[in-house]
Amino acid sequence: MMLIAVFVLFFVAGPLGFRALTAGTPTGRKTRRLALLMALAAASALAMRYGIPDGVMEPAFLAAGIVFFVWLAWIAGLALGTQALRRIDPSPRMHRSTRIGGMLCTTVPWFGLAAADMVGF
């Protein structure tokens, strides 16, 4: 059941979230917001991993939270790179190719999780 929820998160929410984060014209303000989002998500994952003592939180919920924040940092990093490419080349072709490529890349972490689940980690 947990794997199905993660699947939906990666294949539905990921591309939709990426599209929302990269909507509109790239500006310096959006770039700073994406960088801040990425840093906060990564810091949250690290804080959950190393800042919560053992036994305080159910391990499954802790792992789910860490995976969510690492995934959010991944999506924000993809959006940050996309915005940088769009600032360099604002053509419709670049906009379309970065949108498609970024939406496909949001699903990459799923394959790592699925492979780890298959081998029993």
Image (cartoon, helix red, strand yellow):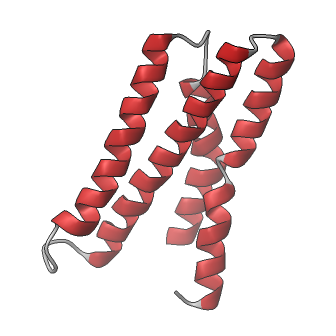
Q: Is residue 95 left or right of residue 11?
A: right
Residue 69, compared with residue 7, is above or below; it is above
Q: Residue 1, can we see it?
A: no
Q: Is residue 28 above or below residue 14?
A: above
**Would you identify the image quadrant in which residue 80 lies?**
top right
Q: Is residue 39 left or right of residue 28?
A: left
Q: Which is nearer the eye, 20 or 95?
A: 95
- At a point 54% along the width and 26% down the height, the residue shown is 21
Q: Is residue 27 visible?
A: yes
At 50% across and 70% down in the image, what residue appears? 2
51 displayed left or right of 66: left
Q: Position of residue 86 (x, y in %)?
A: 69, 18
The spot of residue 51 in percent (x, y) is: 17, 64
Residue 82: percent from the left, percent from the top? 65, 29
Residue visible at 43% across and 12% down?
A: 29
| Number of marks in picture | 0
